[in-house]
Amino acid sequence: MTSNALFEPYTLGSLTLANRIVMAPLTRNRAGPGFVPGDLAAEYYGQRASAGLIISEATQISRQGQGYQDTPGIYTQEQVDGWRKVTKAVHDKGGRIFLQLWHVGRVSHVDLQQDGAAPVAPSAIRADTRTFVNNGFVDVSQPRALERDELPGIVDDFRQAAANAIAAGFDGVEIHGANGYLLDQFARDDANIRTDDYGGSVENRARLMLEVAAAVVKEIGAGRTGIRISPVSPANGVSSSDPQAQFDHIVDRLDALGIVYIHVVEGATGGPRDAASFDFGSLRRRFKNAYIANNGYDLDLATSRLAEDKADLFAFGRPFVANPDLVERLETGAPLAEFDPATLYGGGAGGYTDYPVMAGEGRP
């Protein structure tokens, strides 16, 4: 077998990863009462511990931050205890796992909010998207604009969630700054029409994302902090008139903070890689630590991009759903199983923990 550097160890901050394959965050809508991850979640992540790094499903930092039915949280002791079972399952099998910290902003529904409150957003502009609630997909609700004096509380919710993640045994956290959720909404000038110091200029629209990153770094350290961004993705109805200037600035500031990685969705999330003209190489050059490339990667593309030094790590999403032993399948050239789309969201073990590994492998 020809050697492929994708399957060699990689040093990420103080961690040694077994390989350069990252399991991308995958929302599965299977949290239990109190938005607590259960024993099935521990089994699911443990099955996939051969990934060099697992990034957990997006996890809300507060009740306000929730946007979908049955997604887990990280703001109560019961949630911390539930996640501790997950991290133990991964670590017992030699894996590494970061928790993705999430506030959905306007991508929510009144039925998910405390006392039926309106979702929050940088500006009172309804997103052109849908969410999963009451066992079906519906249009999101009309949001209200956050007041200036509410923003420090959101920053602190991220900080506390990061501390809770470390208490739960995670190796680090990934701040969700992508895909049209709250921090991305602030960065995009179609969703953010504020006239205070969190709106208008490139610097102002980046402010909340960078304040969150700084607070998390101060709480748990730069070596345990990553972030996900999606500069040109139209996910959840966002767009930007100046994505290159906006995200060059954001990455310059993130580099100065010394965070351990940026996780970049290249193109439209789950869609075309060439959805818009954007120089992702500019982000790579501006950032001295690890660059995780995401969006439509397969073995051949990841191998060629690594050889060209276009990225350090490569995130695979949906292939991990039906292939708990994805790394082994990629390394040996084995065929990949297909997932059942009917069981992606919600439910129990079916379509979650019952996908088999390769015959005779004896792997988890």
Image: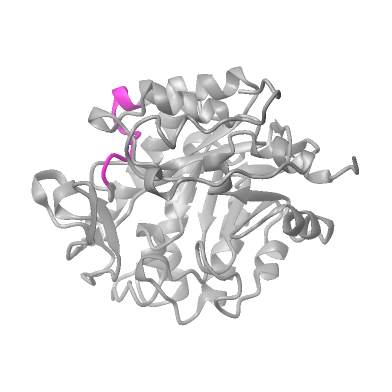
Can you tell which quarter of the image residue 21 is in? top right
Is 188 within the magenta? no
Q: Is residue 107 above or below residue 157?
A: below
In the depicted view, which residue is nearer to us: 126 or 136? 136
Tell me where residue 248 appears, x and y as whole percent: 59, 69
In the image, taking residue 32 as reference, residue 141 lies left or right, namely: left
| SS assignment for the magenta stretch, majority | loop
Can you tell which quarter of the image residue 254 is in? bottom right
**Magenta part of the protein: which range?**
69-79
Tell me where residue 280 appears, x and y as whole percent: 65, 69
- Residue 176 is at least partly visible in this image: yes
Q: Is residue 337 above or below residue 209?
A: above
Name the residue rendered at 38%, 36% in the picture.
161
Is 74 within the magenta? yes
In the image, taking residue 248 as reference, residue 140 lies left or right, namely: left
Q: Quadrant of the N terminus?
A: top right
Q: Is residue 237 above or below residue 210?
A: below
Tell me where residue 48 appears, x and y as whole percent: 58, 32
In the depicted view, which residue is nearer to us: 127 or 254? 127
In the depicted view, which residue is nearer to us: 230 or 183? 230
Name the residue rendered at 80%, 59% in the picture.
304
Name the residue rendered at 42%, 66% in the picture.
235
Q: In the rendered view, how is the structure colored?
A: one colour
- Residue 168 is at least partly visible in this image: no
Q: Is residue 101 above or below residue 359?
A: below
